[in-house]
Image (cartoon, rainbow, N blue to C red):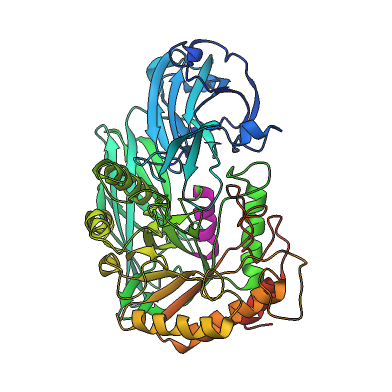
Amino acid sequence: MLRPQDTATRDRKRLDGLWRFALDPAAEGRTARWFAGPLPRSRDMAVPASFNDVIADPAVRDYFGDLWYQNTVRVPHGWDGRRIVLHFESVTHRATVWVGDVEVASHEGGYTPFAADITEHVRAGEPIRVTVLVNNTLSFQTIPPGVIEDTPAGPRQRYWHDFFNYAGIHRPVWLYQTGPVHLTDVTVRTDLDGATGIVEYTSAASGSARTHVVLRDATGRAVAEADGAEGALTVENVHRWAPGDGYLYDLEVQLADDTGAVVDAYHQSVGVRTVKVAGNRFLINGEPFYFTGFGKHEDLAVIGKGHNDAFMVHDFELLGWIGANSFRTSHYPYSEDVLDYADRHGIVLIDETAAVGLNMGLGGGIFGAQGYTTFSPDTVNDVSRAVHAQAIRELVDRDKNHPSVVLWSIANEPESDTEGAENYFRPLFELTRELDPTRPVGFVNVMLAPYGSCRVSQFADVLMLNRYYGWYTHTGDLAAAEQAWEQELRGWASENKPIIITEYGADTYPGLHSIGNQPWTEEYQVEYLDMNHRVFDRIDAVVGEHVWNFADFATTSGVMRVGGNKKGVFTRDRQPKAAAHALRRRWRKDT
């Protein structure tokens, strides 16, 4: 699916702003045809944003079920005779869309885009009513999973991921237009032959037309071109995309009719680079790469998971300040604007699906049985895996052309020490490699499946480990934690695969201090990180360290989560704790 853009042949109109919004706790709206007129009992709601924290009502914050958005927009008058598409970058967790009285789209999955051709239902220059039915409930057949439990106080949504279940229209909504004959897909894969760059491209189109491609450098100079829907371009003395050097070429794909007139054009940015795993090394452009950075979250006060450009730029500025070269899109695909920004600035990404919470030994990040069996016909089953597979397809399809993406993570902290886990994940790894043979594939292993017991890591090209020695275990005893951690890590190192520590961290209340070794203090967070770094520096196979977390973030309520998860080295409003300065000293060589 091509993201909307303005080109010589395409136009787009952004539909963000204030929409009408209504909760539907009785799930009556579809039967009552709420889409056929103004939403009853509606109020204003900002788009993009999570709905939960915008309204000053605890019942709204914790609401689960059906909810509705509606807006009336005008199709630009100049779009007569053009193909018109309605495009959503993400709606969490599922959506059904009507234009006027006509249902035009339905989509499952809260973090990837979907679109509908609405040409037959609209007229240029006239207004249209767009209505979206959103549902944020989770079940064992959703990604991420959850369950609705009956309690004496009524039904409650329960889920096992350790971040708040924000929902709504989280990213931009677009109208865009193309001609009847138009491009439907562009794929690029790059390679290096010494100083020569190789750009393999494949395009797909609706309708018959001739394809011409032009590759331009950052100054706009054409450096290669070719005819045909697929082919290979070579670039002499190529400027490589590299960590810290986000150099991008522009590939323009054109469709022309029999007279030579261009009927469609699309621009795809291209970073020429290679990614490879060799033994226990992770190579970018043939050079060993060491990951420094964080697991992050799309999480902000008031707007929740709603995308915000100002905060995005500020977060990347803080990554530069602290010396981070990478991060993981924990625990779901992030906004495409984030990936575009990473491409342009040479930040390396581990790109993750929303498959978090597939482990009944965990709940909200805390160890402890949840009263269910993870993999069974009644819980996470073949239907769940089909939904998971579709999430992988949509992730790869959306992000395949981003040079910043160097590693796919198909799940975070699933149960991985059982036969059920092995059978569940084997085909998902096979699928991911079939979809993209150019990038390594992995998943994030949790402490409940330590070295020697994990049955899923055999499928991974890279070992990604979340470990909390000194926090959830050996709490406050960093000397014992260091010994236990090193012992386990040396076991993983014997696998001769690259190891990235994708999570290690300690909850820290900003401003809390002590002379002694006291958990929750800023001093303890610094000492905890120092202990981990000593272990990493002694293990040659460790090729990366991602602290959990970049910033404090919202979670479900609980006695272990006072005002959310406090493992951030920045507060939720992006003020540094002492640990941020300690990491800056470690990661930046110029300080």
From what the image shows, is residue 392 above or below residue 515?
A: above
Disc tally is 0
Nearer the observer, 288 or 126? 288
Q: Is residue 343 magenta?
A: yes
Q: Residue at x 52, y 21 (%)?
A: 75
From what the image shows, is residue 178 above or below residue 170?
A: above
Q: Is residue 89 visible?
A: no
Secondary structure mostly taken by the magenta-highlighted segment of the chain: helix
Work out which quarter of the rendered image holds the C terminus and state it: bottom right
Q: Residue at x 60, y 69 (%)?
A: 506
Nearer the observer, 552 or 111? 552
Q: Residue at x 29, y 80 (%)?
A: 495
Q: Is residue 160 magenta?
A: no
Nearer the observer, 389 or 59? 59
Q: State the image coordinates of residue 455 (x, y, percent, origin top left).
A: 26, 66
Residue with the most extreme bottom position: 538
Q: State the image coordinates of residue 566 (x, y, percent, origin top left).
A: 64, 60
Q: State the image coordinates of residue 249 (x, y, percent, origin top left).
A: 45, 59
Q: Taking 330 as reference, is 583 left or right? A: right
Q: Quadrant of residue 116?
A: top left
**Segment tinted magenta in the rendering:** 336-348
Nearer the observer, 214 or 472? 472
Q: Is residue 536 visible?
A: yes
Work out which quarter of the rendered image holds the N terminus and state it: top left
Q: State the image coordinates of residue 167 (x, y, percent, origin top left).
A: 54, 38
